[in-house]
């Protein structure tokens, strides 16, 4: 079950990297001084990716917990 813990840690890190990418992308969009419509369009593209990254991170943490409990 040690492999499950390492797999969960890897999946969590992928989700964290996705979250950091979303934060950096929104930060760059804010710095660009886009108008409301352009900003809204940019954010609407990022929201599903942000949700997916959160789900990936949560799944990884669940794998870590399950791996620890089964050990």
Image (cartoon, helix red, strand yellow):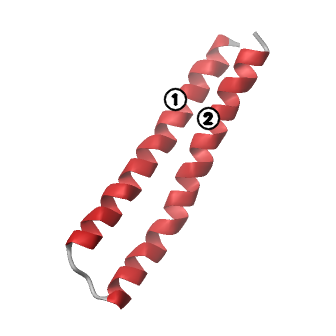
Position of residue 24 measured from the top left corner of the image (x, y, whole percent) = 31, 56
Is 27 placed left or right of 16 in the picture? left
Which image quadrant is residue 9 in? top right
Up the image or down, 50 lies above or below 37; here it is above
Q: How many marks?
A: 2
Using a 10 Å C-alpha cutoff, classify the residue at mark 1 as few (fewer than 14 neighbours), some (14 to 19) or many (20 or more).
some
Comes first in the chain, label 1 or label 2: 1
- Pointer 2: what residue? 60
Where is the C terminus found, in terms of image quarters?
top right
Q: Secondary structure at mark 1?
A: helix
Instruction: Name the residue located 40 percent from the left edge and 57 percent from the top edge.
Output: 22
Q: Which residue is mark 1?
A: 10
CB within 8 Å, label 1 to label 2:
yes
Residue 3: % across, % down: 63, 16
For the view shown, which residue lies furthest in the left direction?
A: 32
Work out whether 29 lies above or below 61. below
């Amino acid at each position: 079950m040690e492999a499950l813990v390492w797999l969960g840690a890897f999946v969590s890190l992928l989700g964290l990297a996705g979250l950091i990418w979303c934060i950096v992308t929104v930060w760059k969009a804010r710095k660009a001084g886009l108008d409301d419509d352009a900003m809204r369009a940019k954010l609407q593209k990022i929201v599903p990716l942000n949700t997916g990254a959160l789900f990936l991170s949560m799944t990884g943490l669940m794998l870590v917990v399950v791996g620890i409990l089964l050990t």
